[in-house]
Each structure stands twice: as C-alpha cells, then as structure tokens.
C-alpha cells in the first residue's frame, strides 16, 4: 500500500469514526466470504457500514479522535461496524447475527462517544427499540390520566344511576 493510500485510509477511518453514533469492533476469524456477504447485507438493511481495517492504520486514525481507549482492541483481524444514525443499530444486528457462530466475536464498541466492552454491547442489544421505550414512557404518563378519567366517569355514572332510580320511584308512586 502506497503512502498516499495509507493517508487516505487513515483519513477515511477517522471521518467514519468521527461521524458515528455507534461503533462495534469485531473479530471475523473463521468467516467465509459467503458469511461476510450475508453479514454485510444484514447490516446494510440497518444502515450500518461494515469495513475490515488494518490495525496500524486504525490506531493512527483514533489517535486524533479521543477514542484512544480503543487502541488495545485493535489486535488480530478487526472489522468495524459503524452506524451514523442509530447508536445501537450495529450492536443489535451484530449480536443477533453472532448467535450460532462461535468463531465470530465482538471485541468492543463506542456508543455516543463512550468506549464500552463486549458485555455492554450485548446489554445494549438486549434493550427494546427506541419506539418501544417511548411507547412505554407515554403509557406511564397516560396511566394516571386514564385512572382519573375512569374515577370521574364512575362518579358521573353512579349519579346518573341514582337519578334514574329516583325517576323510576316517582313514576311508580304517580
């Protein structure tokens, strides 16, 4: 690789990591070309870019990004999954794809600018989607209001029943 290609590669990795909300480093040992193609197709559907990187170039790229804690994870075959839009999309997709593939491992990641280990990546992948969490929050806000409406409605319904019984009594007496 010529020096200009190396500089371009370092700049590309730096830009990719700088624009990312979520990054996952993986070890792709033992993967066939078909497996890699299948994984890339799956990740593309989640708007995640997956790229094999040279460790030395990646270490140079992260030196200027503030992610120097990742340096120790660039050992052995390394690929980077980057999501620019969703901070957990790469974690979810890679954790799901990893099931049943013992040779494929997740090394570490970056979520919202913070370096996390493989255990945290698995924990993030287990979380429900953003839409589900927002729905739960909305339900939690709505529950007290719904209960209040039910109580007020029950009082009015009881009053209506009592008035109806008084009307029936007066009609029976007349």
Image: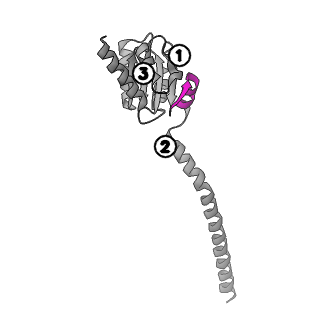
In the image, residue 168 sits, relative to residue 153, either above or below, namely below
Q: Is residue 24 located in the magenta-colored stretch of the structure?
A: no
Q: Is residue 40 visible?
A: no
Determine the CA span between mark 3 and mark 2: 34 Å
- Mark 3 / mark 2, whichever is N-terminal: 3
The numbered mark, 1 or 2, whose residue comes first in the sequence reads 1
Front one among 128 and 11: 11
* 117 part of magenta stretch: yes
Front: mark 1 or 2: 1
Would residue 4 be found to the left or right of residue 100 on screen?
A: left
C-alpha gap between disc 1 and disc 3: 14 Å
Badge 1 crowding class, 10 Å Cα cut-off, few under 14, some 14 to 19, many 20 or more, is few
Figure quadrant of the N terminus? top left
Mark 1 / mark 3, whichever is N-terminal: 3
Residue 60: horizontal and vertical position, in percent? 43, 18
Eye-nearest disc, 3 or 2: 3
Q: Provide the residue designation for mark 3.
A: 61
114 relative to 155 in the view: left or right: left
- The local secondary structure at tag 2 comes to helix
Q: Main secondary structure of the magenta part?
A: helix
Count residues near mark 2 (Cα–Cα under 10 Å), then give few for <14, some for 14-19, many for 20+. Answer: few
The residue drawn where x is 42% and y is 12% is 31
Instruction: Identify residue for label 2.
Output: 131
Q: Which residues are magenta?
A: 113-125
| Residue pictured at 56% horizontal, 46% vertical | 136
* Nearer to us: label 1 or label 3: 3
For label 3, count other residues whose C-alpha is less than 10 Å away and answer few (under 14), some (14-19) or many (20+): many
Is residue 71 something that shows in the picture?
yes
Which residue is rendered at x = 61% and y = 55% of the image?
143
| Residue 86 point in image, percent of width and height | 45, 36
Residue highlighted by disc 1: 72
């Amino acid at each position: 690789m010529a020096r200009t290609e190396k500089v371009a590669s370092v700049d590309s990795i730096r830009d990719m990591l700088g624009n990312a909300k979520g990054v996952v480093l993986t070890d792709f040992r033992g993967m066939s070309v078909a497996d890699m193609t299948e994984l890339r197709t799956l990740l593309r559907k989640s708007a995640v870019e997956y790229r094999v990187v040279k460790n030395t170039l990646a270490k140079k790229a992260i030196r200027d990004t503030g992610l120097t804690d990742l340096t120790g994870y660039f050992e052995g075959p390394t690929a980077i999954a980057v999501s620019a839009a969703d901070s957990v999309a790469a974690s979810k997709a890679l954790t799901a794809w990893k099931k049943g593939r013992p040779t494929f491992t997740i090394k570490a990641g970056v979520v919202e600018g913070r370096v996390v280990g493989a255990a945290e990546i698995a924990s993030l992948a287990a979380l429900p989607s953003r839409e589900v969490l927002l729905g739960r929050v909305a339900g939690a806000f709505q529950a007290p209001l719904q209960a209040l409406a039910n109580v007020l409605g029950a009082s009015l319904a009881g009053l209506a029943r009592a008035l109806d019984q008084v009307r029936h009594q007066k009609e029976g007496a007349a």
